[in-house]
């Protein structure tokens, strides 16, 4: 007898941020939810992405703090990196969060199935162990994997992607990071702080594309000051491993660099090839992204997709937001589509970067006449106290009919703890507030966020310290 497929309100393929957010949100609302996950719930973000990467960046911060302790009158011995211990601590943090997530899913009565799921007609999801599930609704959330480049076969020894870097037990003495985007810059920063000689190779004219040039320049200056070799506008043309296999020479432009490891950080590609989809109306574009409309609906009624699998910013919190909107639609609640031009982005390199909305370049390209103001952290008391004066806040506004700063289009920050300070900028951009409106609010003193307050005050023509 053929077993009847198990029936759920929602079947989710993939238990990363997009998948588990849908499960948690739907479970709380009383929906019967199944999640099919081929590895571990938590996905890239928890096991091979956001959390482990930030944990190692924190290790780098501790190293810098100890190294700079003397300036504060604290005598310590020169720090020594024991990366295996850092690796163990990272794993402890990841495992604790993983246990918490599994507990939460159970509490919300989400049923998890271990295996690879594929979708066929009539909302039937087959797990590779033969289990069959039918969802009144199906959410595809199979995420992404690192992109690679021709000529750089990932071997986990000489050529690494983020997956392998985050599993290292010992750091290389030298590394070429191919790609100067957010993840590449985070790795470059971490490796350099912990003693690796780093070369960054970026094909575009500047590192951190998408960030305001003034912001990216601060990161570039800091990287160079710390001894990193940064090349922009260069294409890598392969590499030649040494005879003993302990190093390799990377060729770019007319130049070469010999390193112990190559970190390929050129973005991620959607993982759609294992989803089945034959006989369904779900369409996949030529780059592998599942096509959705602004409500995350695929071409198959009742089937949605979210997260890195769709062509929207590849960020965990974007996946959360998309999934929450999907579940709200399933529940019959009103939903406002996401405005992707205004989602927040944080980069945890040293110095940190945090942005919401348009850069000055992007605003001009979009046809806006703009008024901008930037205020450096060098004049901020707290920044000097913590010994991190490098950085700035830049606010980009639409020029009003009176020539003054109108609606805030973008807030781009670089410097100490800006990833924790973006909230006000994010709200200002999304509320389409003007500097005059935001300047009404009081910033506590002495805080790093006074720099944002000063910048908006200056845009009203009444800066306290900034002209
Ligand atoms: P994933 O997290 O990739 O999860 C998909 C899940 O689906 C996986 O668990 C996979 O095993 C499973 N799966 C795939 N196919 C199937 C199948 N057919 N059947 C069953 N299961 C399947 N984002 C941020 O917002 N902030 C950061 O600071 C940040 N840092 C990052 C640092 C690094 C090094 C990396 C690599 C990424 C980082 N990201 C960051 C991006 C973030 O990790 C992703 O945007 C996020 O994980 C995407 O979530 P997702 O659920 O769409 O996909």
Image: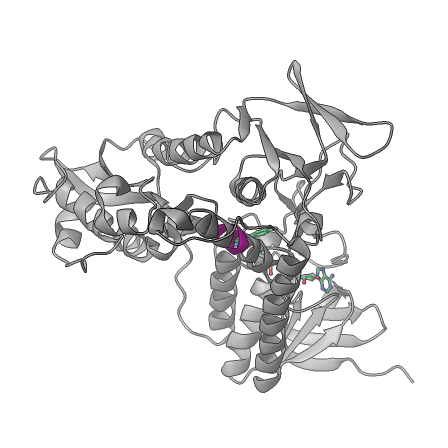
**Looking at this view, is 105 or 56 the one in front?**
56
Left or right of 46? Residue 373 is: left
In this rendering, does residue 112 appear at all?
A: yes
- Majority secondary structure of magenta residues: helix
* Stretch of the chain drawn in magenta: 57-61
Locate residue 130: give its quadrant.
Answer: bottom right
Q: Is residue 105 above or below residue 47?
A: below
Locate residue 265: give its quadrant.
Answer: top right
In this rendering, does residue 348 appear at all?
A: no
Q: Where does the image place residue 53, in percent across and percent down from the top left?
A: 57, 53
Q: Is residue 120 above or below residue 149?
A: below
At horizontal 43% and vertical 53% (from top left) the residue drawn is: 75
Left or right of 266? Residue 320 is: left
Q: Is residue 298 above or below residue 129?
A: above
At horizontal 74% and vertical 82% (from top left) the residue drawn is: 6
**Looking at this view, is 451 or 327 the one in front?**
451
Q: Is residue 28 above or below residue 206?
A: below
Q: Where does the image place residue 399, in percent across and percent down from the top left?
A: 18, 35
How many labels, in total? 0
Which residue extends farthest right? 1
Residue 289 sits inside the magenta stretch: no
Q: Quadrant of the N terminus?
A: bottom right
Q: Where does the image place residue 43, in percent across and percent down from the top left?
A: 64, 62
- Tell me the colour scheme of the image: one colour
At horizontal 84% and vertical 33% (from top left) the residue drawn is: 245
At horizontal 71% and vertical 39% (from top left) the residue drawn is: 148
Q: Quadrant of the C terminus?
A: top left
Q: Where does the image place residue 210, in percent across and percent down from the top left?
A: 44, 37
**Looking at this view, is 384 or 411 the one in front?**
384
Locate residue 269: give its quadrant.
Answer: top right
Ligand 1 found in image quarter: bottom right
């Amino acid at each position: 007898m053929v077993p009847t497929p198990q029936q759920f309100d929602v079947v989710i393929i993939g238990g990363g941020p997009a998948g588990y957010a849908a499960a948690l949100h739907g479970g709380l609302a009383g929906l019967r939810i199944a999640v099919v996950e081929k590895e571990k719930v938590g996905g890239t973000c928890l096991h091979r992405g956001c959390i482990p990467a930030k944990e190692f960046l924190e290790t780098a911060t501790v190293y810098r703090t100890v190294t700079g302790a003397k300036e504060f009158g604290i005598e310590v011995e020169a720090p020594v990196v024991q990366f295996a211990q850092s690796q163990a601590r990272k794993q402890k943090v990841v495992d604790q969060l993983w246990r918490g997530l599994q507990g939460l899913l159970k509490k919300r009565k989400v049923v998890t199935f271990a295996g690879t799921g594929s979708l066929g007609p009539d909302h039937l999801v087959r797990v590779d162990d033969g289990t069959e599930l039918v969802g009144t609704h199906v959410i595809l959330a199979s995420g992404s994997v690192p992109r690679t480049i021709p000529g750089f076969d990932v071997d986990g020894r000489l050529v690494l992607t983020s997956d392998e870097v985050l599993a290292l037990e010992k750091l290389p003495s030298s590394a070429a990071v191919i790609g100067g985007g957010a993840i590449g810059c985070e790795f470059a920063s971490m490796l350099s702080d912990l003693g690796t000689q780093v070369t960054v190779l970026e094909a575009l004219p500047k590192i951190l594309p998408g960030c305001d040039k003034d912001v990216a320049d601060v990161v570039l200056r800091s990287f160079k000051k710390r001894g990193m070799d940064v090349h922009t506008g260069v294409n890598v043309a392969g590499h030649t491993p040494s005879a003993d296999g302990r190093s390799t020479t990377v060729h770019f432009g007319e130049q070469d660099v010999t390193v112990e490891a190559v970190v390929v950080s050129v973005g991620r590609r959607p993982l759609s090839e294992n989803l089945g989809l034959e006989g369904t109306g779900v369409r996949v574009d030529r780059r592998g992204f599942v096509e959705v409309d602004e409500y995350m609906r695929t071409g198959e009624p009742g089937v949605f997709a979210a997260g890195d699998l769709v062509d929207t910013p590849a960020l965990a919190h974007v996946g959360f937001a998309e999934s929450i909107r999907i579940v709200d639609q399933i529940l019959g609640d009103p939903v406002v589509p996401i405005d992707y031009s205004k989602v927040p982005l944080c980069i945890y390199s040293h110095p940190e970067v945090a942005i919401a909305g348009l850069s000055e370049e992007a605003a001009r390209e979009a046809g806006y006449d703009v008024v901008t103001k930037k205020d450096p952290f060098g004049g901020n008391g707290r920044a000097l106290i913590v010994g991190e004066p490098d950085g700035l806040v830049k606010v980009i506004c639409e020029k009003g009919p009176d020539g003054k700063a109108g609606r805030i289009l973008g807030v781009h920050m670089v410097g100490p703890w800006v990833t924790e300070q973006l909230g006000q900028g994010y709200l200002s951009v999304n509320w389409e507030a003007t500097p005059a409106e935001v300047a009404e609010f009081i910033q506590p003193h002495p805080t790093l966020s006074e720099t944002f307050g000063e910048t908006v005050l200056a845009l009203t023509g009444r800066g306290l310290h900034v002209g």
